[in-house]
């Protein structure tokens, strides 16, 4: 299986980790570990609901090529209008502890549904940027 590294950068980390829930990566740790993560087979589909609302779904896979177990990985998905202006920025978890996390050398699928995209969205794949990493 081929993977394309499409992670564009590290936006920043926030919050504190409750006891027993893992270790929030420092910005330096996360920036260094980002090279170990690969997104692949990323696709975007759109459908219309019975109520006429548009549902956009992004699917793909994330692979952890590094040595550490991940409890959580969050992405910022940034949607633009035709003029390059940001119309929506949403943070979503693509790896979660309650779904088993992501072990070293493991690949896991993800699905991101968006049903509140502004009509001014340019209909192009959003920019996806790693926003946070939590290690086991």
Image (tube, rainbow, N blue to C red):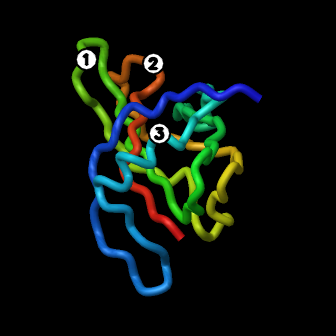
What residue do we see at 39% from left, 38% from top?
Answer: 129
- Does 57 sit above or below residue 44? below
Can you tell which mark lies on residue 84? 1
Tag 3's secondary structure?
helix
Tag 1's secondary structure?
loop
Residue 70 seen in render: yes
Can you tell which mark lies on residue 124? 2
- Does 48 sit above or below residue 51? above
Direction bottom: furthest residue: 19
What residue do we see at 38% from left, 43% from top?
Answer: 76
Number of other residues with Cα within 10 Å of mark 1, as a class: few under 14, some 14 to 19, many 20 or more:
few
Please give the residue where the numbered disc 3 appears in the rendered image: 35
Measured in 3D between alpha carbons, the distance from the residue under mark 1 to the one under mark 3, in whole angstroms, is 27 Å
Q: Is residue 14 left or right of residue 5?
A: left
What residue do we see at 53% from left, 29% from top?
Answer: 5
What residue do we see at 48% from left, 74% from top?
Answer: 22
């Amino acid at each position: 299986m081929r993977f394309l590294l499409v992670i564009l950068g590290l936006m920043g980390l926030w919050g504190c980790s409750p006891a027993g829930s893992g270790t929030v990566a420092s910005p330096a740790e996360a920036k260094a570990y980002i090279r170990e993560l690969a997104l692949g087979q990323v696709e975007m589909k759109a459908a219309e609901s019975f109520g006429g609302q548009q549902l956009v779904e992004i699917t793909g896979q994330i692979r952890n090529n590094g040595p550490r177990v991940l409890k959580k990985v969050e992405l910022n998905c940034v949607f633009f209008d035709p003029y390059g202006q940001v119309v929506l920025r949403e943070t979503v978890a693509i790896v979660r502890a309650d779904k088993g996390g992501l072990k070293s050398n493991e690949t896991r699928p993800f699905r991101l549904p968006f049903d509140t995209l502004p009509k001014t969205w340019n209909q192009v794949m959003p920019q996806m940027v790693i926003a946070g990493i939590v290690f086991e």
